[in-house]
Amino acid sequence: MSKGITREEQLNHLRELKARGNNYVCLGCNTVYMKKPQEEVNDGHGGHYMDMCRCGSDLFVTVDRMIKHISERVTD
């Protein structure tokens, strides 16, 4: 049975993404972005822009934070 990708493979992939200029990952669908995508929102008080992925999520993490989290993660 396969365990999936290793922690080192995850880190290498994230470092490659960062090297290509990708800075953010959507926590809803794992899409990577160079900058956070924005969508115009009209709330009745005038429009404004909000960070929003095309999947509808407004939750993002930086690639640097993901690298740090995976690097610090304790393994069995």
Image (cartoon, rainbow, N blue to C red):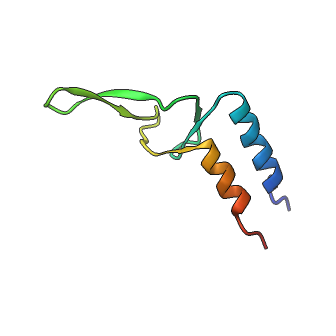
| Quarter that holds the N terminus | bottom right
| Quarter that holds the C terminus | bottom right
Kindly identify the residue that appears in the image at 26 percent across and 28 percent down. 48
Kindly identify the residue that appears in the image at 76 percent across and 41 percent down. 13
Q: Is residue 43 left or right of residue 15?
A: left
Residue 6: percent from left, percent from top: 82, 55
The relative height of residue 68 versus residue 62 in the rendered view (above or below) is: below
Kindly identify the residue that appears in the image at 61 percent across and 49 percent down. 65
Extreme-left residue of the structure: 45
Extreme-right residue of the structure: 1
Q: Is residue 10 left or right of residue 60?
A: right
Residue 60: percent from left, percent from top: 50, 43
Q: Is residue 41 left or right of residue 13?
A: left
Kindly identify the residue that appears in the image at 80 percent across and 43 percent down. 12
- How many callouts does the rendering have? 0
Extreme-bottom residue of the structure: 76
The relative height of residue 65 versus residue 42 in the rendered view (above or below) is: below
Q: Nearer the viewer, residue 34 or 54?
A: 34
